Image: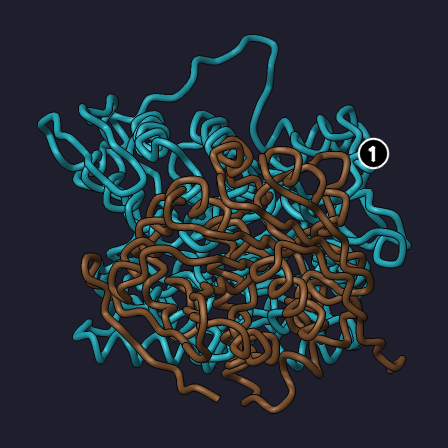
Chain colours: A cyan, B brown
Amino acid sequence: MKFHWFNLMPWPDLPDDFRETHNSVWVDVDSRLYDPVRGHEVYNDYLDMLEFAADQGFDGIGVNEHHQNAYGMMPSPQIMAATLARRTRDVSILLLGQSIAYYNPPTRVAEEMAMLDVMSGGRLIAGFPAGTSMDGNYAVGVNPATLRERYQEAHDLIKKAWAEPDVFAWNGKYHKLRYVNIWPRPIQYPSPPVWIPGGGSIETWDFCAENEYNYSYLSFSGYLRAENLMQGFWQRMEEMGQDFNPYQGAFAQQVCVANNMAEAQELYEEHIRYFFERCLHVSPTFADAPGYRTEATIRAGLQAQVGLAGGSARALDLSWDELIEEGFILAGSPDDVAQQMEKVADTLNVGHIVTLMHFGNMPLEKTLYNTELFAQKVIPQIKDKFSEYEDKWSPHPLPAADMRMPREVPGREVGTAALRARLASEQAVPEGAPAGGGGD
Amino acid sequence: MPDLQTVTTQPGNREVYYYRAGSGEPLLFLHGSIGLTGWEESLEILSQSFDVIAPFHPGWGPAKEQLTDVSTTLDLVVHYDDLLETLGLDRVSVAGVSVGGWIAAEFAAIMRRRVDKLVLINPLGIWDEANPGEDFFAQSPASPTGVQFSDSDLRKSLLVEGRDGLEAMLQEALDLRATAKFLWPIPDSGVEAHLPRIGAPTLVVTSGGDRVLPAVLGDRWQASIAESQATVLPAAGHAAQLEQPVAVAELIRAWVADSTVATPEVKVFAPA
């Protein structure tokens, strides 16, 4: 199995009465809640977390794209991926992803992803989501009636722009370009591995099968609620003649590791609640613009992916124990979590797990603690699962000898040692959490 | 009550789903954002005075698959020119509601010689920043078109009840999708620049209870059309033809037949 570390980068200072006093965390969220000076600190903490996860040996570190919201503050995932590419060496850069239907011309996406692949030495995973309705339709203004057609055309154009060595003309319905000839070109030819984050639309499954893409189900409702959907996906792959390979699937799962269950609850519950109660407070009026879901998807009764409509609403009413029982979170000691993660793998048959170990307003120190325990004590117990399958959906980077790193900056320490030194000097260790984490 | 019939346009080669009944001068009725619920009461009343032709626009109702074929004003105007050719109608009067009001105005502005009289009821297509109305599209999934009624509860009794639940919900969503294709994200279709070309005597009707198109916008439409009058239908919402079918039919009839502006009585709905 492969484990990726992913952070939505939410705004951590939403007020306690946010649900009662604000219409939505997305689209029309009050900008006065944002403080750019505090934002400087928040972005740097969030990037420190991702770099720390890379140091801890995670297979990938993930960023994504959202607009006009306090749920995830990465309007440009490329900017985050660019700084991560320079500050890490061995880890996959999981850009999950860029909503390709939003950009005109889409060759801009092809260019920026090629830049990232070259800068990172071939470590990019290219995620192509359709994007949420809040982002695409209401914040970016893409017409919901044509979003899927635009998505298809952008996809075809980007793939061709990466692969075709000769200058070509693109005469599409939405984009007309007389000369397509992007520079630079990606190291991973003809394309970095492509992952498709999606909900449960049949069209998305067929698209993954036809192109041999990874299908990433990014739910916040946990693995038990995802079982039917992922079974549907695997069944469709079989019908479409794809050999089963667990690495063709990815799943996002919230994980809370501590020394024991009581400590996990003590450390993490308030932040899990912040996430469900405030970060997912999406007005239903922005969740599903007319035409955003296809007719087939509406008929299948499948809901929009992000927000409380998708089944996450239930989390609001559950106790800590029930959140674990129902699979919304994996929690407990490293052994508890390893057992639960094994169940995730067996239930969903997915080889790639996109772990969520920072929730809502969780501070840096607790996040590092959670991350380190998982990396040191959980991953070793289960990483060999599915080792009989070839992972065809991870990057093929340059050999280590060819990999260039930034020059040293005299007087400026970076990396995990520097981060620990800084935290120690700030004496910012949370109660109940040992400063050094669970296993150096 | 006439059955839904189809004809394939020549030229055009597109199947059109439409109702047709009555006798007299031809009247083309262009439906609004929420499509046609069938042979509606206002159409039945109008058919006592006119030869009423009420088609589904490409992309709406049974023509939902045709949405990919049409993207622009020109596509729709050409489509209706083809339909009149196909039906052998040289000139018609046109009444349009909501998004159909926009299409009717474009048709009258571009195909100037085909239109006798024009009635625009709650026409969409002009955006007034000072009077934006409610967002047509960002509505609760439980009541996507509630805002098109003066009281959202009327959606249930006038649009949903008596129809198959899933199919009605789906049709409502797909009809809104079609509206979005042309008027997303704000209803500024560029029609205002074409209005001075309209030669047909035109009545602009807006509705006092319309929450998405404030009634004051009627004056702006009227001001750009040479031979025109504007009137406000009290009480009705954006879907005026469903809420006040008798009044809407009388406004259309009086203007088309007599060039007068009727002041019809409006139905009062009992509080729910």
Q: Nearer the viewer, residue B66 or B206?
A: B206
Q: Is residue A412 above or below residue A2?
A: above
Identify the amino acid type marked 1: Arg
- Subunit bearing disc 1: A
Please tell me which residue lies in front, A201 or A216: A201
Q: Quadrant of residue B33?
A: bottom right
* Residue furthest front in the image: B258
Identify the image quadrant of residue B234.
bottom right
In the image: residue B95, left or right of residue A424: left
| Residue A167 visible in this rendered orientation of the protein | yes
Residue in view at x 23 percent, y 25 percent: A182
The quarter of the rendered structure image containing the N terminus of chain A is: bottom left
- Whether residue A434 sits left or right of residue A82 in the image: it is right
Helix or strand or loop: what does disc 1 sit on? helix
Residue sitting at the far top = A410
Question: How many numbered callouts?
Answer: 1
A381 or A67: nearer the viewer: A67
- Measured as percent of width and height from the top left, residue A21 is found at 89, 53
Q: Give residue B59's position: percent from left, percent from top.
A: 40, 63
Q: Is A386 left or right of A432, judged from the image as shown?
A: left
Q: Which residue is disc 1 drawn over?
A: A32
- Residue A244: image x %, image y %? 24, 74
